[in-house]
Amino acid sequence: MNTRIYYTLLLLFLSLSSLTAQQTIAQKLGYSPDAKLLIIHADDIGVTHSENKATILAMKLGMVNSGSIMMPCPWVGEIAAFAKERPDADLGLHLTLTSEWEWMKWGPVASKDQVPSLVNSQGFFYDNCQTFGQKAKPAEVAIELRAQIEKAFSMGINPSHFDAHMGCLIFNSPEVFEVYLKLGREYKIPVMVDRFFLKASSQQFRDKMKPGDLIVEKTYTAEPKDFESGMAAYYEKVLTNLTTGVQVLLIHTAFDDAEMQALSVNHPEWGAAWRQADFDFFTSDKCRQLLKDNNIQLLTWRALQEAAYGK
């Protein structure tokens, strides 16, 4: 068989297989195969008090129904207390191997001498995925991620899912991607991987997937150009055009206050004003009406975890 035809057929098979799996999960949860199922997911919980406060409020009063925690960050204790008070809250782990802000820095949960390839000369994580990818050893990535997961359990957090801060675990190497997948299988916790990424990635990445792995249909997140043209317009477009299947909308909710402004100095992308705009939209009547008008049903990672692993 011609190689190009073979890979085209293989890609089609993977796409159809993941869609079938999604429909099965939807049906297990009582939804029809053509349901529009959406997780509105807030990243970066634990990075600041402002981030925690805004996200908790958006989960209580708005449409945010999921979020993920950065275990190496300074305000993780506050969100751990919330997780204990609200065991029903859909909180996962934003597995973190970079420290991107100019002045606030963090390093590994594991002992630095166990993960020397993950830190710079000052003992902090690198500030970008490219440098991380060039230097990180997969065995040390596994040590650090396991330390973050175990720290979460020790603090009373029962993660509903795993995802990757800045996408560094997904977009670098197949070996690092495999570490991410294996930890999800070991702990019986879904990891955030979408069919859109798999379709665009190399065969080496797709080979790391196994038949039982949960795959969401697509992950949406705003880019700098969307912030420049207006976040409300971007989110309205996403919600209006959402297709069927399980999809994820990644956002960042915080207040445009002195704390967040100091954190994000010289970093307007995903900065304080950006995060305030996310909070404002996802606590608005407009967002609530768009969900209703487009027949979008909110779903949690916890529900997917129960469907996939029975826990």
Image: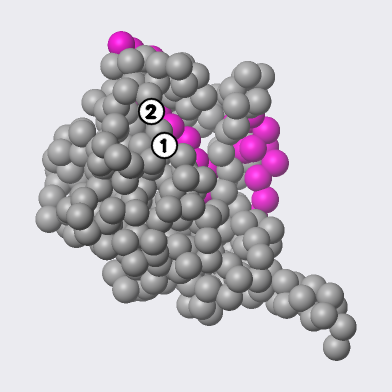
Q: Which residue is mark 2?
A: 101
Residue sitting at the far bottom: 1
Residue type indicated by callout 2: Trp
User: Was residue 250 drawn as part of the magenta stretch in this picture?
Assistant: yes
Could you tell me if the residues under marks 2 and 1 are in contact, i.e. CB atoms within 8 Å?
A: yes
**Regarding mark 1 in the picture, which secondary structure is present there?**
loop
Tell me which residue sits at (17%, 43%) in the image: 80
Residue 4 is marked as none
Q: How is the image coloured?
A: one colour
Q: Residue at x 56, y 39 (%)?
A: 221
Which secondary structure, mark 2?
loop
The answer to whether 84 appears left or right of 305 in the picture is left
The spot of residue 114 in percent (x, y) is 22, 59
How far is disc 2 from disc 1 in space, using C-alphas?
Answer: 7 Å
Q: Which residue is mark 1?
A: 127
Residue shown at 34% from the left, 67% from the top: 139
Q: Position of residue 176 (x, y in %)?
A: 45, 62
Q: Look at the image and say whether residue 53 sits in the magenta stretch.
A: no
Spot occupied by residue 196 in the image (x, y as percentages of width and height): 65, 56
Task: Point out residue 179 in the picture as x, y percentages from the top left corner.
Answer: 40, 67
State which quarter of the image contains the N terminus: bottom right
Residue 301 lies, with reference to residue 120, above or below; the image says below
> From which residue to which does the magenta span run?
234-258
174 or 23: nearer the eye? 174
